[in-house]
Image (cartoon, helix red, strand yellow):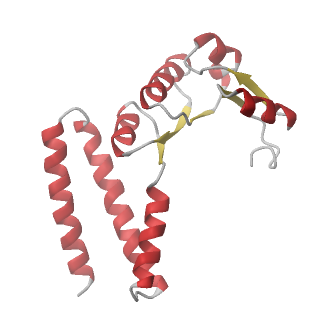
Amino acid sequence: MLSARHIPFTAMDKNSTHVEFVKQLGNRIFFGNMTRLDLMRSAGVKHAKIVVVAVDEIEESLEIVALVKEQNPRIRIIARAIDRTHARRLLASGVEHVIRDTFASSLEAATRTLEQLGYPEGRALEVTEMFRNHDETMLQNSVKHVDDIDKLHKLAREGRQELQELFEKDSR
């Protein structure tokens, strides 16, 4: 998409097949693991405005985020999260924008399920949006307790109760 919009970018990938494909399209790409500081510097992280971290290993992504922030404290980071715990850890590490792997598709499935159960399309979307907003708020509120499992469980129970009350109030 960036290429189609004539927006220059530099990519890094540790999959040689991906690297060769992207090179054939004329884009700048480095082969290797972004946890390697020399590659990160060669790719120009010190002068980058934005970095997107989209790796499959949770610890590796957190290491990349820390290295990127160390090299360029003003950079904006968009990171893919494997799950909710990973999202919480990324947010706690200072990532501004976290994209949860299955969150959007789960919400889409919930919307379609509500429609199949007889909810009008607009109403199904409203209910899904209420859930999305509540869930995002709960995630943000849990960031400061990233290492306190008891507090996280308590917040989850409270959040479930709040959501139930929100939906009950909405259905009146």
| Residue at screen point 82% across, 44% down | 6
> In the depicted view, which residue is nearer to us: 149 or 172?
149
| Residue at screen point 78% across, 41% down | 7
In the rendered image of this protein, does residue 82 appear above or below residue 17?
Answer: below
| x and y percentages locating residue 138 in the rendered image | 28, 53
In the rendered image of this protein, does residue 149 appear above or below residue 67?
Answer: below
Quarter of the picture containing the C terminus is bottom left
| x and y percentages locating residue 156 in the rendered image | 20, 53
Q: Relative to residue 39, is residue 117 drawn left or right?
A: left
| Residue at screen point 38% across, 38% down | 86
Tell me where residue 152 sits by quadrant.
Answer: top left
| Residue at screen point 49% across, 17% down | 70
Image mark count: 0
Q: Relative to residue 92, is residue 9 drawn left or right?
A: right
Which residue of the protein is positioned furthest toward the front in this rendering? 17
Q: Relative to residue 94, is residue 43 drawn left or right?
A: right
In the rendered image of this protein, does residue 169 appear above or below residue 16?
Answer: below
| x and y percentages locating residue 108 in the rendered image | 48, 68
> In the depicted view, which residue is nearer to us: 108 or 45?
108
Q: Relative to residue 6, is residue 143 drawn left or right?
A: left
Tell me where residue 145 sits by quadrant.
Answer: top left
Which residue of the protein is positioned furthest toward the top in this rendering? 38
| x and y percentages locating residue 15 in the rendered image | 67, 28
